[in-house]
Image: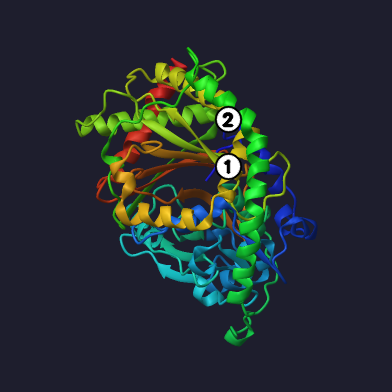
Amino acid sequence: MDSSKNGSVPGSSLAGAFAKPLERARSAAHRAELPAMEGRMRQLTGTDATFVYLEGPETPMHLTTMYIYDQSTVEGGVFRHKDLLRLIASRLDTSPVFQQRMVHVPFDLDHPYWVHEPNVDLEFHVRHLALPKPQDWRQLCVVAARLHARPLDMKRPPWEINLIEGLDHVAGIPAGSFAILVKYHHAAVDGMTGNDILGGLTDTSPDTHPLPELAPYDRSASLPGPTVVELLARAAVNGVTIPLRLAKQVTGVAPDLARMAFRSVSPGGPSGPAVPRTRFGEKVSPHRVVQGADFELIDFRTIKGAVPGATVNDVVLAVCGGALRKYLLDKDELPEVSLVAAIPVSTRPSGETVGPGNSITVMTAALETTVADPLERLRAVHASTKDAKELGSATGAAQMSELASYVPATAMALAGRLATISSLGAHTTPIGNCVVTNVPGPQVPLYLNGAKLLSTYGFGPLIDGVGLLILATSYNKRLFLSLTSCRDLMPDPQFFAQCLRESFDDLMDAATS
C-alpha cells in the first residue's frame, strides 16, 4: 500500500516491467536479484513485523486485490480452475512470497522469520467459487467483502487466490467474465510487491503457454523449520548487536529529526494537521464492506492542469475529500475542521529491485473537507501535500522508518496486541481519519494465460480508529478508486461510491469550465 514518491499515479514507471514478452518479474536475472530463501531464513523487518503484531480477529492484516478478466480472449473461450492451478504452479518461482511461511521466536524475543517452504498445497491456496445470482456488481462486492474479511492461515504461506466465475450481469463487463481475488499478508508485500507479482503471473500478449500437469501434494516433502534452540540463539545475538546498530542509525537520522522538529515549531513552519473525530474513528467490527468506481486516467491529468504544480495524487485526494464531505453532510456529521488522510509513501530507491516485504513510510495531509468549492479544495490539498513533503524528505523518511527494526520485538509485540485487544485506537487521536493510498500500475494490457485483464480494485486492512481505506490504482489508461470499511461504520458503501463519482464530476466541471 504505497503512493508513488512524487504523489502521482502515472503508471509509466511500471510500464517497462510489462512491455516485454517475458516480464522482468519472470526473468532469471530478476529472480537472482531477489532475496534468496532456499537454504536459509530471512527475518522480518520492524515494519513488516508491525503488521503481524497488529493482527486480530477484527483486524486481519492482509491486502486484497480483485482483478476482473474477460475470458472470451482465451483460446476456446473458457478459463478453467485447473488452468489457474497449473499456471500458478508453473510460476511459483517468480516471487519468494509464494514459498515462504512464518516462524515465530518463542515469547516474541525477536521478530519472526520467513523460512523457505518449497512444498505448497496449491489446492488449498487456489480456490474456486461461482458468483451467486443476480451475478451483478453489488453481489460481487458482497462476495469480495466476505472473502477479504476472512483471515489468512498463518501456519502456511500467507496468501490465497480465489477464482470467482459467473460475472454475467456486471455493468460494463462482458458476460461470462471472471474475477481473481488475491490475498497476501501485509507483512509479506506492499503495493509495489503486489504489482511485481502481477507481472510474474501475467503476459503482455494473449498467446497461451503450455502448462505443466499439477503434481500431487506430498505433505512429507515439507522442509523442517528452525529449532527452538536456533531461534533463541539468533535472538540472543540480535539482543547484543541491535543496540549498537540502533546508535549508528540514530546518529544517521539525527539531522533529519532536528530539521523536522525545527520546521514544525518555527513560525509558519508546517506541522501535522489536527485530526477531528468522525464515525470512522470508532472500533471496527470483523465485517467488511468494499466498493469501487472507475474513471479515465486522462481526466485526472486534465484536472491537475487547472492548478499549477498539482499532481494526479492531489486530484485523488481532492476527490476523496469531496466524497467524504458529501457523505458526512448527508449524515449531518461533517466536522468543522478538515478530515485528515494518512498516506503511505514508498521509500524504495528509484531503480531498486522490488522484493518481498514493505518499504513504506506515512505522511499526513488535510483533505480540505471544509472547502465547498471543488477547485479551491484541490488548491488547498496541493498546498497541504506540499507541506507534508517538505516536512520529511524521502531519504530521511526511509532512514527513520528503519528505526522500527531496532525497537525490541517483545515491546512491539506487546504494544501491538494490547492495542488490538483494548481497541486503543478508538479511544485516542489517530494519525488520520482514513488511509488514502496510491499504487501506480501498468499502462499496457495484461493477459492471464490468454484472458484479458479489464480492471483492478484493491482492499486493505483496517485498525480501530482508522475505519476507512481508499485505494487508487491505475491500469491501462484507467484509474480505479476502491474503498474498504466496516459494516458498522459504513452500512451504505454504494452511497459512498456514488459520492466519489459526484465529487469527481464536480471537480471535472470546475476544472474545465
Q: Which residue is mark 1?
A: 401
Near-viewer residue (188 or 147): 188
Residue 113: mark: none
> Which element carries disc 1, helix, strand or loop?
helix
Q: Residues within 10 Å of mark 1 (few under 14, many from 20)?
A: some
Seen from this angle, which residue lies furthest top?
267
Horizontal arrangement in the rendering, residue 149 relative to residue 183 (left or right)? left
Horizontal arrangement in the rendering, residue 437 relative to residue 219 (left or right)? left
Residue 183 percent across, percent down from the top left: 49, 60
Horizontal arrangement in the rendering, residue 89 relative to residue 430 (left or right)? right
Question: Please, what is the three-letter code of the amino acid marked with disc 1?
Answer: Ser
Residue 62 percent across, percent down from the top left: 47, 57
- In the rendered image, the vertical position of residue 117 relative to residue 114, given as above or below: below
Seen from this angle, which residue lies furthest right?
29
- In the rendered image, the vertical position of residue 222 relative to residue 64, given as above or below: below
Q: Residues within 10 Å of mark 2 (few under 14, many from 20)?
A: some
Residue 391 percent across, percent down from the top left: 54, 25
Q: Which residue is mark 2?
A: 257
> Splitting the image into 4 quarters, where does residue 91 fall?
bottom right
Please name the residue shown 66% across and 36% down the image.
251
Pointer 2 or 1: first along the chain = 2
Question: Please, what is the three-letter code of the amino acid marked with disc 2?
Answer: Leu
> Which element carries disc 2, helix, strand or loop?
helix
Please name the residue shown 62% across and 77% down the image.
119
**How far apart are the alpha carbons under marks 2 and 1?**
12 Å
